Structure formats: structure tokens, C-alpha cells
Image: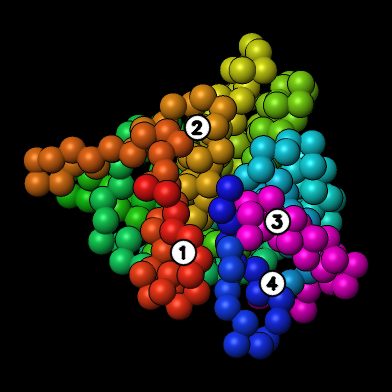
Amino acid sequence: DLGIPIRLSSDFNIPSTRSSIQASYDRIVGDLKAAISLLPVAPVHVVRPSKPAAYALLARVYLSMRKYKEAEEYADSSLLINNTLMDYNMLDTTQTYAIPIFNPEVTFHAIGANTPTYYALVDSKLIKLYSSNDLRKTIFFNRNANDTYSWRCSYDGTNYDLFVGTATDEMYLTKAECLAHLGDWQGGINVLNTLLIKRIKEGTFIPVIANSAEDAIKIIKSERRKELVWRDLRWMDIKRCNKEGDNIVLTRILNGETYELRPNDNRYALPLPANVLKLTGMPQNPN
């Protein structure tokens, strides 16, 4: 399948060509593994790369590939260096942005493009996933006067930049899901509970219980969706989960007309710009 252009030369006279998906992933994984031995265990600052950050990004890449053994191993390697979790009970919710920038969970701080999502309303189906004693509901979102919800704060410490870096909470969820996929679903639930006790109102936490691997995976995926909101990870998760039969259908209603994106649709890959095709002659994504 068609992947990304991989440019290994600074010579701008060489036209870009598209590699395969396999070559694209091989390059990403190879670069990250090569970086690990060159990076410090503790960064000068979390805006600088480090070993736990490289391990975390490898875990994310392998999870995207649905290689659960490798994803679990690298998530664990990252957590062995930094496994700190904030207790959301200790956050000052009277502040406009309750989550501090460069907080102790962050292993690498990076932001996406400035986004107007603070104007957007949050999907009511997502809001309903949070229990009344789940602190994430009030820390991540603002409740509006008309009983809708909008974005309050990300791990960038603001509500106008998307945090797209790596953090320990993502690694706990990755490790938990991978353990469940690999057969140790009870171990996965135990890892999940280590995270959730820091997210539920003090004195009200009841450990999550699963009855099977399938049940555990479903629970962990739901918690991943609730925890990693505004992290630019949901798109990746939808695509990989639909490969496994989750049948997630994205629906939007605009001016009375309903639009749907079905599982594994070609439209998950955006079309390449026409000027790029003209300059390079590389093939367009199928539609």
C-alpha cells in the first residue's frame, strides 16, 4: 500500500516518490531505535527529546501497527524511567486551566497547530461516558449555560493548542491494552486501575473489574478515549480498532444532511494536493 514520501537527501532536484506503508513504518521505527542510544535518560527540559520519550513514541507506533508485544515492551521501558501520575484531586480547578504546562506526566512536550476547537461543542456521546465522580469531566471540559460542553484544558496548559507529545498516562493505557490483547487481561486491568485511582474523586474510587479478555479490552479502550481526549490520537485509534471489527462509524449532521465515514473507508486518507502530484508524478490516494 502507498505510504509517505521518504527523503534521505537534501538535494531538492531529486523528485519525491511515495514509499510503501511497510517502508514508512520501517523508517520511523529504525530512526527511533537509533535515537534511543543517543538520548539522555533525563532531558534538559521536556521540550527536548529523551530515552523515555523515544520509548513512548515507539510504543505509540507499534500500537498503531497492532503489534501488541512490542508496544507493551516499549511502554514498559518508558514507564521504568518515568511512571509519575498526577492526582487530579490535587489540581486547582478554580484556575482557568487546571492542568499545568510541563506537568510531571509529560515525557516530551509538543503541540500541534493552533486550533479553534475551543469554539466547538463536545460530542454528547463522549460526555456521557464520564461518571459523575470522574474528575476529568470538569477538568477537561466546561459546562455551558445550555447544558452543552466545550473544551477547557489540554496538557499544554491551555485550550487553544493541542498537546501531541508523550506522557505517562498514555503509556499506562497502552501497556494495559496490550497486556489484555496478549492474554494477561487481569494484569491489564490492574494497570488501568493504577491510572484511574488518580482520576476519580477521592473517597469514591471503586476498582474496575473485567470478566474476560474481551471485556477488559473494551473497558480499556473506553478509558483511553476518555483520558486521551485532545491528544490527536483518536484518529489513529479509530483506524486500528476498525481493523479489528469495532465498527466505529463517524457521523456528522450539517444543515440537516447526514455525513458518514464508514470503517476502513479510503477517505480516511486525505487526497494529496494537485500541485504535488503535478510536480512529482506520485500517485494519488484511492478514493
| Residue 95 in the image: above or below residue 120 | below
From the viewer's perspective, is the residue at label 2 or at label 1 nearer? 2
Mark 4 or mark 1, which has the lower sequence index? 4
In percent of width and height, residue 61 lies at 67, 51
Q: Amino acid at mark 4?
A: Val
Q: Residues within 10 Å of mark 4 (few under 14, many from 20)?
A: some
Q: What residue is shown at x 44% (from left), y 54% (from top)? A: 285
In percent of width and height, residue 266 lies at 42, 44
Give the quadrant of residue 4. Answer: bottom right
Residue where numbered disc 1 is placed: 162
Give the quadrant of residue 104. Answer: bottom right
Q: What residue is shown at x 41% (from left), y 39% (from top)? A: 265
Given contact means CB atoms under 8 Å apart, are the residues at marks 2 and 4 in contact?
Answer: no
| Residue 14 in the image: above or below residue 174 | below
Residue where numbered disc 4 is placed: 46
Residue 190 appearing in the image: no
From the viewer's perspective, is the residue at label 2 or at label 4 nearer? 2
Mark 3 or mark 4, which has the lower sequence index? 3
Residue where numbered disc 2 is placed: 242
